[in-house]
């Protein structure tokens, strides 16, 4: 997976880098089916100039589509965690659509019909 992270108006990167590296490895476990050189992750940290608020935007480019997620929080780590959790949810939904899980759902009879 190719990863590039930009830091705009950020003084110290170290706490955010450790959190991002941990979350990227967690995301990599979901994307084992794709070739590593075809998956690209672009992220950008921004600090709001008038508030104590950080925004983290993620773009994940897969061979089958592109996913976007953002996270906003008072801390860089919290905004990264929020964005990655949203992206994890989107990746799981995207992979289930590719596997066509909706066609394989078991249709159960209504509860009254069994009795």
Image (cartoon, rainbow, N blue to C red):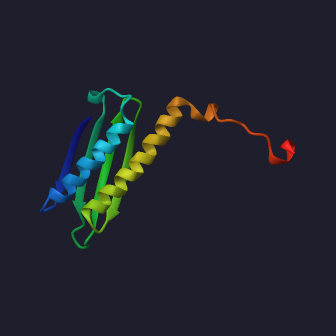
User: For the point 43% across and 41% down, which residue is it?
Assistant: 91
Residue 5 locus on image (x, y percent): 21, 47
102 is higher (above) or lower (below) than 81:
above
In the displayed structure, does residue 88 sit left or right of residue 18? right
Q: How far from the left and from the top, in percent, is residue 96? A: 51, 36
User: On the rendered image, what quadrant is the C terminus found in?
Assistant: top right
Q: Residue at x 41, y 46 (%)?
A: 88
Q: How many marks?
A: 0
Residue pictured at 27% horizontal, 60% vertical: 77
**Residue 4, quarter of picture:** top left
Picture quarter with the N terminus: top left
Q: Is residue 3 above or below residue 45?
A: above
- Name the outermost residue toward the front: 115
Residue lying furthest top: 35
In screen coordinates, is 107 left or right of 27? right
- Where in the figure is residue 106, as x and y percent of width and height? 68, 35
The residue lying toward the viewer, choosing from 4 and 19, is 19
Q: Residue furthest left?
A: 11
Report the residue at 16% width, 61% height from top: 10
Residue 32 left/right relative to 18? right
């Amino acid at each position: 997976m190719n990863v590039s992270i930009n830091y705009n108006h950020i003084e110290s990167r170290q706490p955010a880098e450790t959190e991002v590296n941990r979350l990227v490895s967690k995301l990599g476990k979901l994307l084992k089916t794709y070739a590593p050189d075809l998956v690209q992750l672009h992220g950008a940290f921004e600090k709001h100039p008038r508030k104590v608020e950080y925004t983290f935007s993620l773009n994940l480019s897969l061979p089958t589509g592109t996913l976007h997620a953002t996270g906003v929080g008072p801390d860089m780590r919290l905004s990264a965690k929020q964005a990655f959790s949203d992206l994890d949810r989107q990746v799981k939904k995207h992979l289930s659509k590719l596997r066509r899980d909706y066609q394989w759902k078991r249709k159960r009879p209504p509860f009254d019909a069994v009795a």
